[in-house]
Image (spheres, helix red, strand yellow):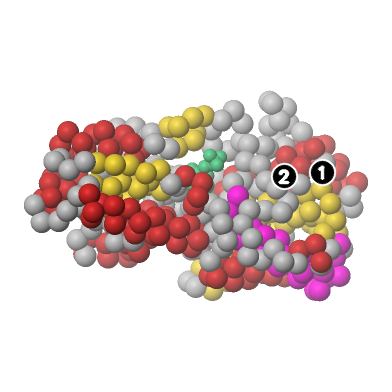
Amino acid sequence: MRIALLTGGGDCPGLNAVIRSVTKSLIRQCNAEVWGIADGMLGLIEQRGRWLSWDDVGGILATGGTVLGTSNSSSPFNVKGVDRSAEVMDYVRDLKLDALVAIGGDGTMTITHGLTKLGLPVVGVPKTIDNDIYGCERSFGFDTAVATVTDALERVTTTGQSHGRIMIVETMGRYAGWIALEAGLAGAADVILLPEIAYDVDAVAAYCREREDRHRHTVICIAEGAKPVGGELTVAGRVEVGGDPIRLGGVAHALRAQLQPLVRSEVRATVLGHVQRGGSPTPFDRVLATQYGNAAAGLVARGEFGRMVTLQAGGLTSIPIDDVAGRNRGVEGDSPLLVCARQIGVMLGDA
Ligand code: F6P
């Protein structure tokens, strides 16, 4: 058996743990030869890669990034406006590949779904710090990002307390508020602002003023995709090709400017950015990534293609990539975590 492996989209803690687990499992379970495609979809288009041995994937479990490289602005269906998917399929046939294991987020799953329709047997592994993949309770990388943001919130809290400031911390997460919500709760943020709930600047300011009378500081955790009531997303830039052309970033600074005239304390903003995607995966993510990799190899061994491994109701399972492609999972209004945050008095921007 010959199986190709690629990591697509943004890097994420735990990618190497999946690469290690898939490769070892495929070698042990299927006596497979494993072809590691370089730089994600870009390497598939440009036909670049290398064989991965058992030893090649040793010692990478706890390392950040991806030893294969990745890209998040390449699709074989749109290379500078040209559809090169037929060439990709020729390449797959030339390499005599039996299947592709694609480790990625919604963008990678959507491209992968397109390749499945051309006849490529594919298995998906859900990756993203955003935790927004449809049908997946926990993507690996999320837990590490939450730990990083939690640490950052605790660190800015001491500055807030010492100087009597309002400290705003901006998280990643794209159009989903999972990172901000979980880290906000773990890091004891006073205000948590999510893309799913438009925030009312006057209400946030009133809440901060009320705190000014009783406390020296307020900590606000805001997701990059959050918007004020009647306002727009804060866009840092745009990309030419790939899945989502919008790069988010900077809403913390926008909020700082809106808030400062309405409160007595100095307001400061910190945009965490890519520190959330880097570093060593937490033990939880190492274990989840290892389980996902092993489960993906199991799907390959059983010939169950066109499926993505996933976690549902706390258990490992798999779902059709067809169901995942082009969809996302945001924080629902009745999410138990959201309800819990409200009930312990966290301000969510809307009241
Ligand atoms: O999807 C992961 C993610 O880190 C998002 O949270 C963020 O909006 C985006 O990727 C940033 O991508 P890039 O590194 O291309 O700017």
Q: CB under 8 Å between callouts 1 and 2?
A: yes
In the picture, measured across the screen, residue 110 lies left or right of residue 169, that is right
**Separation of residues labelled 1 and 2 (CA atoms):** 8 Å
Q: Which mark is residue 84?
A: none
Asked if the stretch drawn in magenta spans residue 212, the answer is: no
Looking at the rendered image, the quarter that the N terminus falls into is: bottom right
Mark 2, residue position: 39
Point 64% across, 60% down: residue: 63
In the picture, measured across the screen, residue 305 lies left or right of residue 3, that is left
Residue 291 position, x and y percent, is 63, 71
Point 76% across, 47% down: residue: 38
Instruction: Give neighbour class at mark 2: few <14, some 14-19, many 20+ (Cα, 10 Å).
Output: many
Dot 1 falls on a residue whose secondary structure is loop
Residue stretch rendered in magenta on the structure? 11-33
The answer to whether residue 308 shows anywhere in this view is no
Residue 77 position, x and y percent, is 70, 35
Mark 1, residue position: 48
Decide which of 27, 261 is in the foreground and name it. 261
The reply to whether the residue tagged 2 has its Cβ within 8 angstroms of ligand 1 is: no
Asked if the stretch drawn in magenta spans residue 15, the answer is: yes
As shown in the figure, which amino acid type bears the numbered disc 2?
Asp
